[in-house]
Image (cartoon, grey):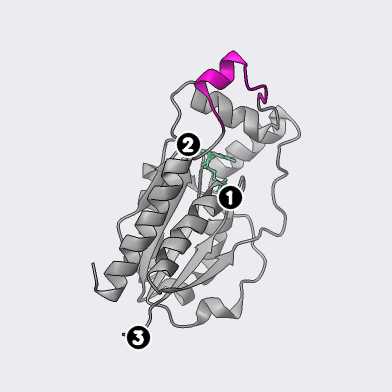
C-alpha cells in the first residue's frame, strides 16, 4: 500500500502544543505515515516569561484583537503534496494565536486549499471561539475541515487559571510540598493526554490508510 504524507504546521509558545504533537506524530509514524513538521517562528516573538504584569496584559489585549505576529518564511516542503495537513497551536485570548493567524493570511490558501485539514488546539479551557474562527478561515481557504482535536489543561479552576498566570510570569511555585502544588501538580498537559494524543495520531493514520 502506498504510504500517506501528513504535514503538521504548528506554533507553540510554552511548548504544550509541541509536546502533544510529538506524541501525535509518533502515533502517525507508528502506522507507517510520513510526517513533516513545520514550526512557525514569529519574527518578533513575545518574551517568555513576560517581564511584567503590564507586558502580559498588553499581550492579552493584542491577542484579543487578533493582532497578527508575522512569522519567518516557511520551508518549501510546506507547498508539496500531502494527504492531510494538521494546523496546530494554542488559544490566545479565546482566539487563534497571532503566528497562526499570520500563517493563515499569507499561506493558508497555498498550503490548505483542497486539502483535508485537522485543527489541533492546546488551551487552558476555552477553545470554542478559536475553533469556530479557524474553521471559518480554513473553509475560506478552500480546505476540507476535519473535526477538531482539542486538549485542555487537566487541573481544576481556579488553580488552572492561577497556574497559567504564574507560568506566563515565570513565577510558578516550584516547592513540591507547598499547598498550591497539592491542587496544581504542574503547568499544562499531563502524561495521560500525551498517550491520548498518540492514540489520536494512530486513529488519523488508520483513517488515511483506510485500515481503521
Ligand atoms: C497570551 C495568551 C493568552 C491566552 N489566552 C487563553 C484563552 O483565552 N483561553 C484558554 O483556554 N487559554 C489561553 N491561554 C493559555 C494557552 O492556550 C495554553 O497555556 C496552551 O496550552 C499553551 O500552548 P503552547 O505552550 O503550545 O503555547 C493563553 C496563553 C497566552 C500566552
Task: Indicate whether 121 appears above or below 4.
Answer: above
Q: Which is more foreground, mark 1 or mark 2?
A: 2
- Is residue 24 or residue 83 the one in the foreground? 24
For label 1, the SS is loop
> Was residue 182 drawn as part of the magenta stretch in this picture?
yes
Q: CA distance from mark 3 to mark 2?
A: 39 Å
Q: Identify the residue at image location x=50%, y=27%.
A: 160
Where residue 131 appears, x then y in whole percent?
38, 50
What residue did someone put label 2 on?
A: 124
Q: Nearer the viewer, residue 196 or 138?
A: 196
Residue 20 disc label? none
Q: Which residues are magenta?
A: 173-186
Picture coordinates of residue 108, whole percent (x, y): 47, 69
Q: Residue at x 70, y 27 (%)?
A: 171
Mark 1 / mark 2, whichever is N-terminal: 1
Between 156 and 179, the residue placed more toward the observer is: 179
Return the residue found at the far right.
Answer: 51
Which residue bears the numbered disc 3?
2
Amino acid at each position: 500500500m502506498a504510504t500517506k504524507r501528513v504535514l503538521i504546521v504548528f506554533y507553540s509558545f510554552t511548548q504544550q502544543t509541541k509536546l502533544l504533537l510529538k506524541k501525535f506524530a509518533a502515533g502517525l509514524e507508528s502506522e507507517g505515515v510520513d510526517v513533516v513538521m513545520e514550526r512557525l517562528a514569529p519574527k518578533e516573538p513575545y518574551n517568555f516569561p513576560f517581564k511584567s504584569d503590564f507586558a502580559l496584559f498588553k499581550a492579552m489585549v493584542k491577542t484579543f484583537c487578533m493582532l497578527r505576529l508575522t512569522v519567518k518564511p516557511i520551508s518549501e516542503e510546506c507547498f508539496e503534496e500531502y494527504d492531510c495537513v494538521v494546523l496546530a497551536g494554542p488559544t490566545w485570548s479565546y482566539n487563534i494565536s497571532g503566528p497562526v493567524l499570520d500563517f493563515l493570511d499569507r499561506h493558508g490558501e497555498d498550503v490548505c486549499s483542497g486539502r483535508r485539514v485537522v485543527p489541533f488546539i492546546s488551551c487552558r479551557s476555552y477553545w470554542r471561539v478559536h475553533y469556530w474562527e479557524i474553521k471559518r478561515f480554513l473553509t475560506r481557504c478552500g480546505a476540507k475541515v476535519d473535526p477538531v482535536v482539542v486538549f485542555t489543561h487537566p487541573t481544576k479552576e481556579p488553580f488552572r487559571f492561577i497556574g497559567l498566570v504564574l507560568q506566563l510570569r515565570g513565577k510558578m511555585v516550584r516547592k513540591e510540598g507547598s499547598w498550591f502544588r497539592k491542587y496544581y501538580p504542574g503547568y499544562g498537559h499531563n502524561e495521560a493526554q500525551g498517550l491520548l494524543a498518540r492514540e489520536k495520531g494512530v486513529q488519523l493514520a488508520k483513517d488515511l490508510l483506510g485500515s481503521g
